[in-house]
Amino acid sequence: RVTKEVDSTSKEAKSFLKQQEKWQSAPASLPTVSGVKRPSGMSSLLGKIGSKKQKMSTLEKSKLDWENFKEEEGIVEELAIHNRGKDGYIERKAFLERVDHRQFEIERDIRLSRMKP
């Protein structure tokens, strides 16, 4: 069982609440018209017990494990500060992107200068 805390106004929380409402209102909304098959007591219970659980992907599980690890070790703020710094992942990606763009411009200028004569 996995527990996850989210903001009550988030999209994920709203979808969870809607799902909970569906589960609670489902037995009351069963049709009682004759000719429509209603689940009987024992088979209904077995159906609920045997129903497939929602599967969690590897990425979702890894993300939850990482979030739990960060909370347990108390390193959330430290990681945020480090990632904003000079050695952070985002800064490195931005630097590499600038270098790649600058290299492309240099190569483009060389190609254009060769075409003009």
Image: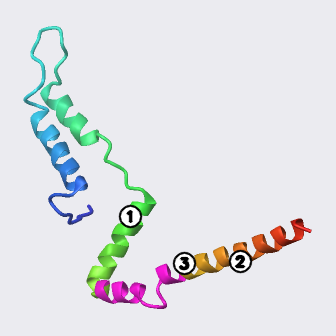
Query: Which percent across, then down, holds residue 56?
Result: 37, 55
* 83 shown above or below 58: below
Residue type highlighted by circle 1: Lys
Q: Give residue 61's mark.
A: 1
Q: Quadrant of the N terminus?
A: bottom left
Q: Quickly name the residue at label 3.
A: 93
Label 3 sits on what residue type?
A: Lys
Q: Quadrant of residue 65?
A: bottom left
Q: Mark 2 sits on what residue?
A: 103
Say which residue appears at 71% left-offset and 72% top-offset: 104
Q: CA distance from mark 2 to mark 1?
A: 39 Å
Q: Amino acid at mark 2?
A: Gln
Which mark is nearer the camera, 2 or 3? 2
The image shows residue 105, relative to residue 31, as above or below, that is below
Q: Which mark is residue 32?
A: none
x, y percentage for residue 58? 44, 61
Can you tell which quarter of the image residue 8 is in? bottom left
What is the crowding at mark 2: few (fewer than 14 residues within 10 Å), some, or many (at least 20)?
few
Q: Is residue 27 magenta?
A: no
Question: Toward the viewer: 108 or 44?
Answer: 108
Q: Nearer the viewer, residue 113 or 11?
A: 113
Instruction: Give the residues drawn in magenta, as a range.
Output: 76-92
Q: Secondary structure at mark 1?
A: helix
